[in-house]
Image (tube, coloured by chain):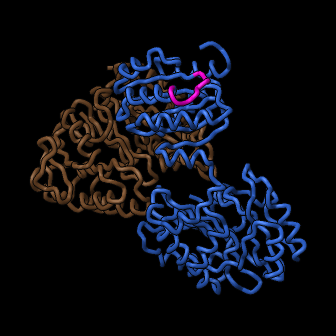
Chain colours: A blue, B brown
Amino acid sequence: MKIHEYQAKALFRSYGIPAPADQLATTPEDVRKAAEHFGTVVAVKAQVHVGGRGKAGGIKVVKNADEAFEAGQRILGMDIKGITVKKVSVVESSAEIEKEAYLGIILDRAIKGITFICSAEGGVDIEEVAATMPDKIITFSSTSRDFPEDEARAVAGQLFNDETKADAVLNIMRGLFKLFVEKDCSLAEINPLVVNSRGDVVALDGKINFDDNALFRQPDILALRDMDEEDPNEIEAKEKGLSFIQLDGEIGCMVNGAGLAMATMDMIKFYGGEPANFLDVGGSSSPEKVIHAFKLLMSNPKIKAILINIFGGITRCDDIARGILESFKHIDIQLPVVIRLSGTNAEEGMALLEGAPLVTADTFGNAVQTAIRLANGEAA
Amino acid sequence: MSILVNKDTHVIVQGITGRDGSFHARQMKAYGTQVAGGVTPGKGGQDVDGIPVFNSVKEAVAATGANATVIYVPAKFAPAAVIEAAQADVPLIICITEGIPVMDMIEVYHTVQNRGLRLIGPNCPGVISPGQCKIGIMPGQIHKPGRVGVISRSGTLTYEIVNALSERGVGQSTCIGVGGDPIIGSGFRDLLPLFQDDPDTDAVVLIGEIGGDEEERTAELIKASITKPVFAYVVGQTAPEGKRMGHAGAIVSGGAGTAASKIKAFNEAGVPVARTIDELADTVAAKFKA
């Protein structure tokens, strides 16, 4: 789960990490009021979950309330990578930036632990720094919930190449680690972490992602979730026990298992089509899940054909077949549907589907190619 | 004949009185797996189809001499279940449970590791040595005894591929689903050397997917120390960036973890990467049909 910058900064503050004062605004008039409240230079920053806000024109530094109003008018309602900006953070920006650095913590699959990533190159894309100047990146890790005190102490002074800032940096590292561990983060980054003209070390921008598996024990984090940023179909699918991701193509897929669902999408592309979605109906699929899955697919007007690809393990093909028959009863399905059932109870499933208005295929490859032909308006 | 599990493996089932645990305990027993017992706290003394239930792993191991355990308990309780198994020094711990918080897995992983034990999973289908022992949730009937090892990050996709191999007369020595989570007990790099040393495995099929860099690291290992033929298949080429593709670990972030990067790494290590499942199965069958 992702949260907004202003929410990340509020969490930073609660863990003792200084961040400039800010106010959230949803109208240009509120932006003006916030700027008047601070009475100084402010940054008006679009709050969306996608990166590249600056490049898209979603961040504007302004000198007075009138300019702030104009910036609010321009940024609110702006489209950034397909997401409409509905709120901006107005950030007090009276202090000049003297030095910028990067400080992040990631979940490290390779060492099965938590790794700090530090760089004196701040305010830029850290992946790019890693690719082009790997010697500018310092890392150290912990394989438990304990803060790696000694390693952090050794690095703290290097971040701004200034030992007088070491204590402030070390405190921020401690706070960020505590936040990461206590709130079940998968990523927590401060970019940039700056030294300002007052000599303070401050988090100017931040990003935090959380482990979805742990949200059940993080009610205060779950409360930060912004439904405006998520696809309503994906949310609904999740509630019904389906795993769904919307894509741009014309072939709707219904598959059991995440790996097989990805393989099905890849196969569609391999044979010259484009998948319209990722949809995993999961193991032990009940007929109800199949009906929900059909409803999801039918709500996408781009879809020209539906491909159902099931390999029965725990999932029983006859259960899927019953779900399909029920779906045809309850939903007006005008699109061509191609089905391939294999594995547990495949024959029973196919027998149940006899006479139903769909095209059967004997293999995965044939099913994909047939679906593509049908989507193109050709004969099966 | 295999790695990790064989006809001498005696397994206990943690969570045996639950819906999934009892169903799969029966399925495993029907396949011929030696299911020695089950564990559900507070239900010791009962039985599930003649399989004795114990209150704790320690009790179950003491009474049955089990040398493996499989865990079907819900995500909230699964970390404690793995740690209980580790404290009872069960050498092979297979955790099927999906949805365990990653922070918990860090502690679980290092606890198991520090005691010198092996963990498979979580969020995995389990391990099967066809004809000998099946521990997990995979359908037994699609497997066929043979000399090709399979390691996969997926579940259903693995069944599809195993089925394609079996249909072409390619049997398997052992098939392992390592799990779809970011932090898992054993990965490709931990298991590939076991197949390399297994006199009854001739070749290995690796089924990778987007997310992380296990495939890239495995390619390095293959270059350095694996002499048996390895064949690969990688899914997720059409996955959008920043989206979790069903598995918690299957995500491309910041341009890292892409299918293209993994395919390139395998190719550079001399590992052929099939474009389709049929191509994979045909390639393996051409060389290793029984």
Q: Is residue B124 above or below residue A90?
A: above
What residue appears at the point 54 percent right and 48 percent down from the top-left corner?
B244
Can see residue A209? yes
Q: Position of residue A37 (x, y in %)?
A: 79, 82
What residue appears at the point 31 percent right and 52 percent down from the top-left corner?
B119
Can see residue B214? no
Q: Nearer the viewer, residue A33 or B280?
A: A33
Q: Position of residue A107 (x, y in %)?
A: 50, 61
For residue A331, side relative to residue A194 (left or right): left
Name which quarter of the figure residue B32 lies in: top left
Q: Position of residue A341 (x, y in %)?
A: 43, 24
What residue appears at the point 79 percent right and 66 percent down from the top-left corner?
A27
Q: Is residue A363 above or below residue B233?
A: above
Q: Position of residue A172 (x, y in %)?
A: 58, 78
User: Residue pushed farthest right?
Assistant: A66
Secondary structure that dominates the magenta span: loop
Residue A335 falls inside the magenta stretch = yes
Q: Which residues are magenta?
A: A329-336
